Amino acid sequence: MTHQLCWLTQTLTDVPQNHDWLSEGERAILAGMRFPKRRNDWLLGRWTAKRAICARQSPGSSAFSSIEIRAAADGAPEAYLNGKPAEVSFSISHSKDQGFCAVSPPGLLIGCDLEFVEDRKDPFVEDYFIPEEIAFCRSVPGKEALADNLIWSAKESMLKALRQGLSRDTRSVHIRPDPWEEETSWNTWTGQCIETSRIFHGWWRFLDGYVYTLASDQRTHSPEQLLV
Ligand SMILES: CC(C)(COP(=O)(O)OP(=O)(O)OC[C@H]1O[C@@H](n2cnc3c(N)ncnc32)[C@H](O)[C@@H]1OP(=O)(O)O)[C@@H](O)C(=O)NCCC(=O)NCCS
């Protein structure tokens, strides 16, 4: 069976100024956050995730404040509805003022990430990529920045799906983008854990200066944008 991955982006200007949409627990956490950038990222991620989860379940069915997005011990986000684990898999990313959330049926391991496409300072790829990935990045003349950020973002998505993030060596996974025709459409990539050969299935696209990636431990249909 092939599953459906859904996605949603929101910007900082979409996030309501009031905090009525946060649960009591979330308001307590926000009150302890000192740094404006972290507050904004945290709010944007939670706003994007709540909108995505509600849009996928049944639009308008839940008050946003009855959903709580908690960080598990490993840092991965988990959703609770009225205090009980919600039947959903999801992942959060934020970059600049852009929030990105991927949602799928429960039971899938998924991860998402977005990166603003800009030149990475040397020796970024040498430090974080394996030789095959470096060779790929050098095989697309004129698109090096896109390729570098695509590989990096795909690694982050896969490491989020594994719930390990950057606590794991980025060179322990091998990202292979498939040949593509149109970079603004969803394209496929595969990620493999080098030690175990475990495979993750990925999607990527370039849009408005960002590269978006999604990873899943199971095959999925081309990602579907949620309408809110
Ligand atoms: C996960 C990680 C790669 C994200 O990096 P980033 O590019 O700076 O940030 P992004 O905006 O793309 O993603 C951030 C989101 O990833 C999610 N995330 C964090 N840790 C995660 C993990 N282990 N697994 C899956 N998702 C995770 C969170 O939802 C976070 O947003 P939030 O804190 O606002 O809820 C990075 O935060 C990381 O590796 N952290 C270290 C993990 C770790 O050591 N955790 C120890 C316990 S906290």
Image (spheres, rainbow, N blue to C red):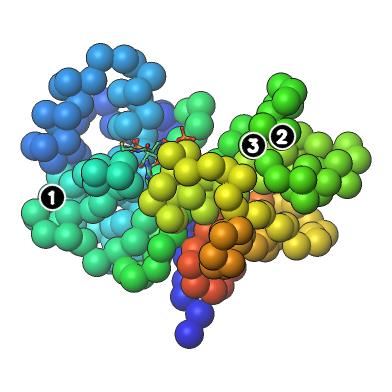
Please name the amino acid that badge 2 sits on: Val
Q: Are marks 2 and 3 in contact (CB under 8 Å)?
A: yes
Q: Is residue 101 above or below residue 167?
A: below
Residue drawn at (31%, 41%) of the image: 75
Residue drawn at (64%, 37%) of the image: 128
Question: For this rendering, which residue is in front, 191 or 206?
Answer: 191
Please name the amino acid that badge 1 sits on: Ser
Question: For this rendering, which residue is in front, 10 or 30?
Answer: 30
Residue 8 visible within the image: no
Q: What residue is pinned by disc 2?
A: 125
**1 vs 3, front mark:** 3
Question: For this rendering, which residue is in front, 25 or 63?
Answer: 25
Q: Secondary structure at mark 2?
A: helix
Residue 71: where, in percent of width, then height? 25, 42
- Around disc 3, counting alpha carbons within 10 Å, would you say few (fewer than 14), some (14 to 19), or many (20 or more)? some
Q: What residue is pinned by disc 1?
A: 66
Q: What residue is pinned by disc 3?
A: 128
Residue drawn at (70%, 45%) of the image: 130
Q: Earlier in the sequence, mark 2 or mark 1?
A: 1
Q: Secondary structure at mark 1?
A: helix
Q: Is residue 51 left or right of residue 4?
A: left
- Around disc 2, counting alpha carbons within 10 Å, would you say few (fewer than 14), some (14 to 19), or many (20 or more)? some
Q: CA distance from mark 2 to mark 3?
A: 5 Å
Q: Is residue 82 left or right of residue 173?
A: left
Q: Name the outermost residue toward the bottom.
A: 1
Q: Is residue 131 left or right of residue 149?
A: right
> Which label was assigned to residue 223?
none
Q: Secondary structure at mark 3?
A: helix
Please name the amino acid that badge 3 sits on: Tyr
Residue 134 visible within the image: yes
